Amino acid sequence: MARKDHTGRRVPKPSKHLLSSRIARLIFASNLAGLAILIIGAMVLNEMRASFVVAKKQDLVGQAQVFSNLLAEGATFGQPEPVMDEELARATLADLSLPVSVRGKVYDPDGELVGDSYFLSDRVIVSGLPPLQEPSQLSRWSRSLSEWAVSTFGALVPNRGGDAVRTQTFEQEYAVAMAGGEAASQRFNDRGQRIISVSLPVQHVSAVVGVLTLESNDIDEIIRAERAALIPFIGVAVLVALITSALLTIGIARPLRRLSEEADRVRSGSSQELNLPRITRRRDEIGALASSMEAMTEALFERITSNERFAADVAHEIKNPLTSIRSAVETAERVQDNPEAMRKLHKVIAHDVGRLDRLITDISNASRLEAEITRVPTETLNIARFVADIVATYEYLAIEDDQASVVYEDATMGAGLRVRGREGPLGQVIRNLIDNGLSFSPPAGKVFVRVEQGRIGPQTTARIIVEDEGPGIPDDKFEKIFERFYTDRPKGSAFGRNSGLGLSIVRQIANTHLGHVWAENRAEGGARFIVELPAT
């Protein structure tokens, strides 16, 4: 859904839920993209590692079964006490074609080493020592990051490789093999290398006469290959982070910076309005912000222009009665010996003083109205009773100077309509409308005030209707009469009793109470003003 600002533009309605925000979804998606790639990469590499370890174990088990059978056939003998010939066992082990990364060992039933393929094949293990140096800061950071990644992803992704090949000591593995079982484990050897070890019993008939152990030390190469395989995922994650950061900069930071620059131009006086058509067309919070700032800037300049016009109008309106009073005072000095002329001049001065007092009062009310509305808290009012109390103050007006009277009618049929508002400003609305009706009513005329119940869609409303028996409103003035200092009064109306601010104040107060006011003419003659406020 979208709302309209005061210029009629559609402004996106602010979202109440976090993830319903387009910018919030963009930020979440962009930040999670890199993490998702790392998680997927870790899961894929974990599966690769598990498959490598399981495949290595199965390969060693297959080789161990073949070599164990060879040892059983060529190096064991004896009935009924079968034994393993150690010389034949070493010779058979030396003849085995073991890969460089696989080491074979044969143990007797007492756990003593009988033969080692590394020594029987005259193999020399050569490995260069790395130079002694302090690890760099980058290396320490990389190791910390690696440990964090292992601990984080290890909790999220099951380690199938670790479950397939358990970590246990050689003694535990040897005991399983001596019991006639197949044992596999992963551990560190005496050179500090991570190895996968498989132990199988060497049997003569059904008796276990020794244990064959095959160890593969290329697991570190598998892990290094795994880490190397993670580099592309890290690169993609970094690339995605850079791209999403750039998109966020283009989609969020740049428009906000442009908005800030335009606001600075307005503040410095270089421009009187924001010019951001591309940003205001966006259908997200930044577009809504730009539209709101444009509307705010326009409202501020309209307020400034209005205040300037208001000040000029105030000076003009105050100058008229002051000029009349000064003229009357100057004339009174010349006709002091004429009581009748003095009486007329005193009446003119009193009339203009009253007019000036009313004008100043209305100006003061209009200038502080906005601040008063923001300071005074709202309360729930029984609108029919509230209007009746105000009308009661006009009860004895018709006795003096043959003025028009005020008649009240409660047309709500006891509905007890209640309105949420501020008592002072709402009372001013009713008094201004009644005073306006009295100023245009003929002598001995009537001003009718009525409260009734209305409805706008599902919303119940309270309508305050004020009618007079005056000359009515010209057809082209129904909106203009609500402008400040509008003074185009019909012929025959009481001139000095209108400041031109009353109806402007009425509309301003009605708008701040989420209501509206309009004017129309009665069929039988006279004007009708309707104020419609939402009822609670």
Image: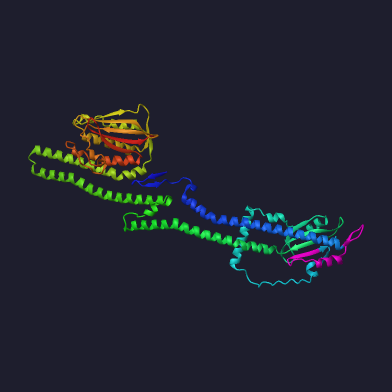
Q: Is residue 90 magenta?
A: yes
User: Residue 401: x, y in percent?
Assistant: 18, 31
The stretch in magenta equals 76-105
Name the foreground residue: 42 vs 267.
42
When asked about the image quadrant of residue 85, the answer is bottom right
* Quadrant containing the N terminus in the rendered view: top left
Please report the residue visible at 80 percent of the width from the left and 62 percent of the height from the top: 67
Let me know if residue 19 appears in the view.
yes
Q: Is residue 98 magenta?
A: yes
Please report the residue visible at 47 percent of the width from the left and 57 percent of the height from the top: 247
From what the image shows, is residue 524 above or below residue 173? above
Specify the farthest residue to the right: 80
Residue 96 shown left or right of residue 134 in the figure: right
Name the foreground residue: 185 vs 204.
204
When asked about the image quadrant of residue 238, the answer is bottom right
User: Residue 488: x, y in percent?
Assistant: 20, 41
Residue 314 shown left or right of residue 222 in the figure: left
When asked about the image quadrant of residue 222, the answer is bottom right
Name the foreground residue: 169 vs 338.
169
User: Residue 96: x, y in percent?
Assistant: 79, 66
Residue 333 shown left or right of residue 393 in the figure: left
Please report the residue visible at 29 percent of the width from the left and 39 percent of the height from the top: 506
